Image: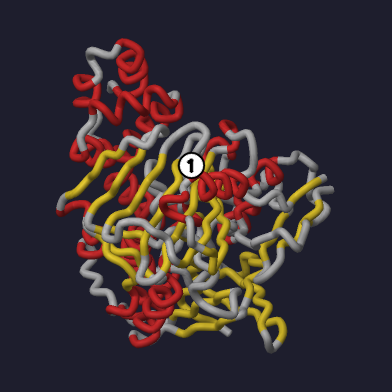
Amino acid sequence: MKVDCLIVGAGPAGSMMAKEMASLGYDTMVVEKRQEIGAPKRCAEGITKHGLDKFGIKLHPLCISGRIGGAMLYSPSGKRVTMEGKEMEGYVLERKIFEKWLASEAIKKGANYMIKSHAIAMKRHNGMWRVEIQTVEGKKSMEARLVIGADGVESKVGKWAGLKTVNKITDYHSGIQFEMANVNAEENYIHLFFGRDVAPLGYAWIFPKAFSSNVGLGILEKGAKMKAYDYLIKFIKEHDEFFKNAQPIEINGGGVPVAHFTEMVADGVMLVGDAAQLVNPIHGGGIARALHSSIMAAEIADKAFKRNDFSKEMLKEYERKWDEEYGEKTEKLMKLRNFLEKLEDKDFELLADILQGEDIFALTQAKLSFMVRKVITHPGLLKLAKKYLMD
Amino acid sequence: MIKVDKNKCLYCGGCVGVCPVNAITLYETRIEINDACINCGICIKFCPVGALEE
């Protein structure tokens, strides 16, 4: 069987790509190894309104399980800083529904889907990729001029195409999460918790949903004394004010690529979303970037089809476009991450005293230089800030 | 070779993304480690639930 564009993976990136390619009139096939699109979920399900509006995405109301009006940040000793503002507004999605909805949008545009269909190998053949797929009906083979790797952190497509997509453990959060019922956390806010003993080199979170909450954390192994799971159990035990009568209804694990190393294209191959390590290095959110990467990739893919040129050189325009839009910001946020990784609990306490909510929002937008002015009277922090945040 | 405790594994696939020799594959509800494994232990360090061991 031959198609124009074969997409491996039906997460947010894969289905967005499918929607774009099918809309442009290309014969598009999506293969998804799981028997249910969207489950088990792989994140805390948050996305900013801006992250959707930017691409004109109007969610089906069923995709939304909670609303975000701001964030409450907690220092190790429990000092709280509240961030609010239009830019902070967003949604906690119900990803099981969101991903099925996105797939249905792609299907309406003409995309084809195969579920419980696992791409297990891929080889170059007469200028096309031949992909072997294990399905309920047995092994199938499919040929395509363009293969999209939307296959997540466990991506194989890039590796088969010779790209070095391995994540470094120093830049890859070990994530764990319970969805819990009956959590006593203020709705309309996401709650973020910092501290060396809370979530080393990462943070813990509570994202309230309609009748449950995502409660999880991400850590970096180099700062950890135990497994992410153990930190989460400890976090829940130590916060009776939130979890006294709460019980888990789902558990999720996951790797979060908080740095972007990999090349994004090879001959006849483009990587999108987590497969291309496209995650905000500070908060670890990846849905908006995944959607955007697919929109960009489809634009360049369209050019490639029109010119009948699927060479790496041709497809490289996608990578250049991505770097133009996100390169500088990602680099600054990496600096900020390096700075935060050096902080001791006492430094977090100090930051909670001197920073206002809007300051922290500015930081997450990669506006860093004001931070140095803010900490100018605190020699310990100033040294760190100068070293890691100055250009 | 690294072993998987199937009772603990959440099949999140996170270990696949850090394996330097592409020895791990995530199937729908299990991971498999093949002979390419060099016992480097990076996946063990990553695993959020401690489902991997030598």
Residue at the far top in the pictured view = A379
Q: Is residue A358 above or below residue A153?
A: above
Q: Which residue position is annotated with label 1?
A: A261
A289 left or right of A377?
right
Q: Looking at the picture, which amino acid does disc 1 mark?
A: Phe
* Residue A249 visible to the viewer: yes
Question: Where's the N terminus of chain A, which quadrant?
Answer: bottom right
Q: Is residue A229 above or below residue A36?
A: above
Residue at the far left in the pictured view = A86
Q: Position of residue B13 (x, y in %)?
A: 62, 58
A327 left or right of A361?
right
Q: Position of residue A264 (x, y in %)?
A: 46, 52
Residue positioned 50% across, 83% down in the render: A113
Residue closest to the eye, A199 or A136: A199
Q: Is residue A3 above or below residue A353?
A: below
- Label 1 environment density (alpha carbons within 10 Å; few <14, some 14–19, many ≥20): some
Q: Tell me which colouring the rendered structure shows.
A: secondary structure
Residue closest to the eye, A239 or B5: A239
Q: Residue B34 is drawn in which quadrant? A: bottom right
Q: Position of residue A288 (x, y in %)?
A: 33, 59
Question: Where's the C terminus of chain A, which quadrant?
Answer: top left
Q: Chain of mark 1?
A: A
Residue positioned 26% across, 39% down in the render: A81
Instruction: Count how many numbered circles sit on residues in the image.
Output: 1
* Residue A311 visible to the viewer: no
Residue positioned 15% across, 54% down in the render: A86
Residue positioned 62% across, 46% down in the render: A230
Q: Position of residue B41 (x, y in %)?
A: 74, 41
Residue closest to the eye, A362 or A11: A362
Mark 1 lies on a secondary structure that is: loop
